[in-house]
Amino acid sequence: MQRFATRFTGVFSVALLAACGGGASDAAPAAEPAATEPAAAAAPTVALPEGVTQEMVAEGKVLFEGAGLCLTCHGMDAKGTTLAPNLTDGEWLNITGRNYEEIVNLIMTGVPQPKQHPSPMPPKAGSSITDAQVRAVAAYVFSLGSN
């Protein structure tokens, strides 16, 4: 099976290259699109609560994807896995709604008995992040809104 996949990938790559005009030695290099402005972190889709800043959201994203261990169960894109719910869809299973302080509390205390997933979430997801870092992760989760 692996040999078939390798052959298929090779054939597909050659066909794609030919279809796109690749491989012609006299072809001029494609012009790079002009940069209009520097890449920036995506702005939240919802208004942030009082006291929550864009810097907290940015820090929370980094923590979510790293030291906070959140991506382990919620996935890199926060859209959930079989272990934990989607945090981007607006459906909140273990709190009453998208309320920043409730999100902070949920992360701090964990979810000992999840409503729809097999594994409990320990306090701070079992990580050693600080209380201030929990607030940053909560800011990021809050900012995900109901995309």
Image: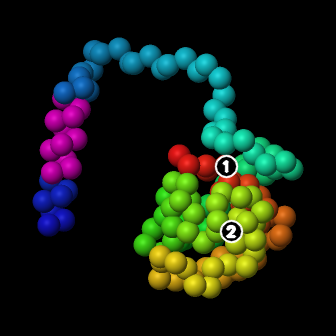
Residue 55 visible in rendering? no
**How many residues crowd around disc 2 within 10 Å: few (fewer than 14), some, or many (20 or more)?**
many
**Residue 13 inside the magenta-drawn segment:** yes
Residue 98 image position (x, y, % from top left): 66, 57
**Which stretch appears magenta?**
8-18
- Judge left or right: residue 31 versus residue 104: left
Residue name at image x 18 percent, y 29 percent: 18
Image depth: mark 2 or mark 1 in front:
1
Residue 125 image position (x, y, % from top left): 66, 76
**SS at badge 2:** loop
Residue name at image x 23 percent, y 23 percent: 21
Residue 28 visible in rendering? yes
Q: Is residue 116 above or below residue 43?
A: below
**Residue 36 inside the magenta-drawn segment:** no
**How many residues crowd around disc 1 within 10 Å: few (fewer than 14), some, or many (20 or more)?**
many
For the residues labelled 2 and 1, say whether their Cβ atoms are less than 8 Å apart. no
Residue underneath mark 2: 68
Residue 36 image position (x, y, % from top left): 61, 19
Q: Is residue 47 above or below residue 134?
A: above
Quadrant showing the N terminus:
bottom left
Residue name at image x 81 percent, y 46 percent: 53
N-terminal of the pair, mark 2 or mark 1, is 2
- Judge left or right: residue 65 versus residue 55: left
Tell me how far mark 2 sits from mark 1, CA to CA: 17 Å
Residue underneath mark 1: 143
- Judge left or right: residue 143 versus residue 7: right
Q: Amino acid at mark 2?
A: Gly
Q: Amino acid at mark 1?
A: Ser
Residue 17 image position (x, y, % from top left): 23, 32
What secondary structure is the stretch in magenta mostly built from? helix
Foreground residue among 9 and 51: 51
Q: How many marks?
A: 2
